[in-house]
Amino acid sequence: MQKRPLAYRIRPTSLDDIVGQAHLVGENGVIRKMIERKQYFSLILYGGPGIGKTTIAEVIAHHYGLNQYTFNASTDNKATLKEIISHAKNYGALLIIDEIHRMKKDIQDYLLPHVEKGNVIMIGLTTNNPYHSVNPAIRSRSHVLKLNSISENELFSFLKKLIEKYPDDLSANFMDDVITYIVNASNREIRSAINMLELLEIAFTGETITLEKAKSVILKPALSLDKNEDNYFNILSALQKSIRGSDVDAALHYLARLIVMEDLDSILRRLSVIAYEDIGLANTSIQTKMHACARACERVGFPEARIPLAVLVVEMALSPKSNSAYAALDKAIADIEAGKTYKVPNHLINVDNYEDKADYLYPHAYENHIVKQQYLPDELRDVRYFNPVETSKFERSLKERLDKIIEILRKD
C-alpha cells in the first residue's frame, strides 16, 4: 500500500506536539485551559495558511468526546449541513468548518440557532479576518482566536527534530543551510516545509543534500496568491506604506513579493492610487509616468514588466509627498455628509429667468483675471479646505499663487 504523505502521518494528536502558538496551547494558553477544565465553546481560529489551524481543531476534537464532522464552506452544500445537524440533535456534534469566510449567508443563518442552543460545537477555520468576513451573528456566538505566524527559529527547530525522529522517511543528510532555505522557501508554512523535505528525500535518498541541490528542486518560494486572504492585501498595503514613508528598499522588497505572485493588475491599481494619494501635488509628473509605466507593463508582460515597475517605484519612494489635494476634498465631503448643503449664491445660478438672479462677475474681464466675488454658500463663506504643504517646488508655487489671490482680494 502506498504511504500517505509525511505531513499527514505526523499530524499532532496532542497540544504538546503543536509547533508554535504558545499563547493558545502553551502552559497558560486559553485552549489548554479550556480542555483541562472541560469547558467547551464554539471557536473561530484565524491565521495564515499552513500554521496549524486544522491541527489545533482536530486536537480539540479529540478531547471533546462528541461525534466529529467536517464541513468545507467552499465545496459542501446546505444538504450536507442538514444531515450533520440531524445527527447533532440527538447526540451532539463537534463541527469543524473549513474556510468559514466562504460560507453562504443562508447556510450561516441555518447553522446559527444550533450553535446558539449548543447542539453543535463549532470550530471555524479561516485565513481572513473574521471581523470582516464572517456573519456577525455567528461571530458573536464564538470566541475568535488568532494564530500567530510560525517564527523561523520555531520551524527550523521543528524540522531538525523531524529529521531525527523519522530516519527511515528522511534518510538524506540535510545540511543546516538547506533547512534554513526550506524555512524561507515554504513561507514558514509547516505543511509546505514538510512536503519540501519529503520531495528532497525522494530526489536525493541517502545523499548529502547541499544548498545547490535543494535549489535545483525547490525553485522559488511558496507564496500564496489567494486574493481573498488578508496576507495578500497586507503586502499591497505594505508596499503603499513603504512608498509613503520614502523607504525605497522596503518598497522594492514588497514589489518583489508581488511580482513573484505575478499579479500585474493589482500592482498597477495600487501604484495608481499611490501616485495620486501619497505623491499628489508634490510631483504631478508621477501620474503621467504611472500611466506610461502601466502601458509598458501591459505591452511586455512579465518578466520584463519588472523593469518599468522598478523605475517607477524607486522614483515614487524618493519623490516628495503631499496629500493636500485629497485631504482638502475629504474635508469638503465630510461637510456634505454632515448636512452642510446650503443654498448656492444667486449670482452663480445659471438660469436666466431665476427670480432672484444677480449679476455674475466674469473674472477674465478683470485685472489678473481675479475679481472679488463670493462662491461658497453664506454659511460656509470663510471655510478653508485646501492647505498646501511645501514639500516640493510645484506645491510651493501653488501656495504662493493662493497667497497672492488672497492678497489681491483683500485690496478690493
Image (spheres, rainbow, N blue to C red):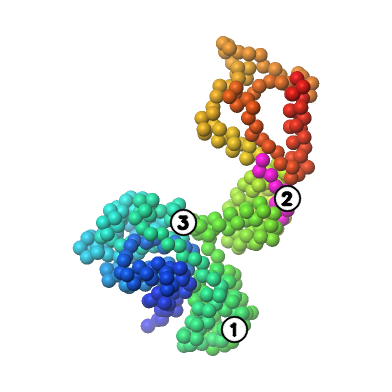
Q: Is residue 33 covered in magenta?
A: no
Q: To which residue does mark 1 refer?
A: 175
The C terminus lies in quadrant: top right
Could you tell me the amino acid type at mark 1?
Answer: Met
Report the residue at 63% width, 17% height from top. Answer: 347
Separation of disc 2 and disc 3 at Cα?
33 Å
User: Alpha carbon of mark 1 to alpha carbon of mark 3: how far?
Assistant: 37 Å
Q: Which residue is painted at 48% across and 87% down in the image?
A: 167
Q: Nearer the viewer, residue 47 or 73?
A: 47
Image coordinates of residue 366 in percent, x first then y, are 77, 19
| Residue placed under numbered mark 3 in the picture | 129
Q: Nearer the viewer, residue 406 or 253?
A: 406
Question: Where 38 falls versus 306 (above or below)?
Answer: below
Based on the picture, tell me whether residue 316 belongs to the magenta stretch: yes
Q: Is residue 401 left or right of residue 195?
A: right
Residue 43 vs 339, above or below: the answer is: below
Q: Secondary structure at mark 1?
A: loop
Find residue 371 and report its horizontal and vertical position in percent. Answer: 73, 21
Q: Which residue is mark 2?
A: 319
Secondary structure beneath disc 2? loop
The Cα–Cα distance between marks 1 and 2, rounded to whole angstroms, is 44 Å
Mark 1 or mark 2: whose residue is earlier in sequence: 1
Indicate which disc, 1 or 3, sits on the residue closer to the N terminus: 3
* Badge 3 density bin: few <14, some 14–19, many ≥20, Cα 10 Å: some
Task: Residue 79 in the image: state x and y as whole percent.
Answer: 28, 57
